[in-house]
Amino acid sequence: MRRVSLIAAALLSLTLAPQAGGQGADVLLNCAACHAVGPDRNAGDVARAPSPYPNLNGQSVRYLDRQLWAYREGLRQHPQMQATATALGDGAGAMARMYADAPAPELTFTASPGAFADAETLVMEGDWSRGLPSCASCHALDPDDRARLSPRLHGHPAPYIARQLRAYADGTRRSDPMGRMRAYAAELTEDEMSQLADYYAAWGPETDQTQEDDTDG
Ligand code: HEC
Ligand code: HEC
């Protein structure tokens, strides 16, 4: 972990140098201020508020690299991340690799079973009457297949997930290959989007309570 942070710091100072004149580059390029590398607030220290930002650790390098490209190209709209990705330039690939190499968070379902029943049906079975395959067929918790283009959604903050689904639905996020996520999101109702967001956000670090429930230890 420490080694990863040192590499990050080194990379950042490298990418920072040519940006010294650019306004706020030091803030924009301090990735770890928002996307902590390592367990951070997402594990262990559950007393602290969870991060409002997407957790990049252990996502596939292809996915991360593609997102930085998408911000740069305006296929994803978020002024601050667009400025960041532009400032990163050629450093994007290295940052994608660093986060991909960081250990994925260990997550468990923290809500009561059935709390998000409709969302769970969409996640596990989909809805073929609307041409929706199960979300789980592409979005896995276990990032064993590092070549995947579909990211882990588990543990992302609910407002982040809901915003992405709306952005696909209204076509302002166009980073998805062949427009698949745009087509799926357009089939979802507003209620379904927010319940799906709550379902995925309910995956969190193990607490004493969830550990007690887990007899396998
Ligand atoms: C001030 C906080 C902040 C900083 C600093 C920051 N980010 Fe972000 N990042 C965000 C937010 C907020 C989003 C979600 C934006 C959106 O809704 O599209 C995001 C999204 C991303 C995503 C897409 C995540 C996904 O799941 O699709 C990647 C990749 C990313 N950031 C990489 C970086 C890298 C690399 C750096 C440093 C060079 C960085 N970010 C610096 C706040 C930050
Ligand atoms: C056929 C595979 C597939 C299916 C099925 C699928 N997705 Fe996706 N999804 C993807 C891919 C690939 C991406 C990355 C697209 C991109 O680069 O923007 C993605 C991206 C997303 C994102 C953005 C993640 C982030 O970190 O920003 C969300 C949210 C999402 N999908 C939700 C869902 C939900 C909810 C379902 C089920 C209703 C679903 N997806 C079904 C392939 C799929």
Image: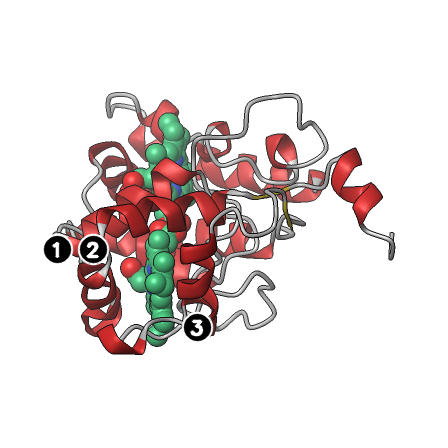
3 or 165: nearer the eye?
165
Circle 1 packing at 10 Å, graded few (<14), some (14-19), many (20+), is: some
**Residue at the image point whose x is 41% and y is 57% from the top:** 118
- Percent position (x, y) of residue 25? 32, 27
Type of the residue with mark 1: Gly
- Please indicate, yes or no, whether residue 16 appears anywhere in the rendered image: no
Q: Earlier in the sequence, mark 1 or mark 3?
A: 3
Q: CA distance from mark 1 to mark 3?
A: 25 Å
Type of the residue with mark 3: Glu
Q: Earlier in the sequence, mark 2 or mark 3?
A: 3
- Percent position (x, y) of residue 154? 51, 51
Q: Which quadrant of the structure image shows residue 8?
A: top right
Ligand 1 shows up in the quarter that is top left
| Whether the residue under disc 2 has CB within 8 Å of ligand 2 | yes
| Tag 1 residue | 171
- Percent position (x, y) of residue 124? 48, 68
Q: Are marks 2 and 1 in contact (CB under 8 Å)?
A: yes
Mark 1 vs mark 3, foreground winner is 3
| Whether the residue under disc 3 has CB within 8 Å of ligand 2 | no
Which numbered marker is on residue 168? 2
- Please indicate, yes or no, whether residue 28 appears anywhere in the rendered image: yes
Circle 2 packing at 10 Å, graded few (<14), some (14-19), many (20+), is: many
Name the secondary structure under disc 2: helix
Q: Are marks 1 and 3 in contact (CB under 8 Å)?
A: no
153 or 200: nearer the eye?
200
Name the secondary structure under disc 3: loop
Circle 3 packing at 10 Å, graded few (<14), some (14-19), many (20+), is: some
- Percent position (x, y) of residue 171? 12, 55
109 or 170: nearer the eye?
109
| Tag 3 residue | 125
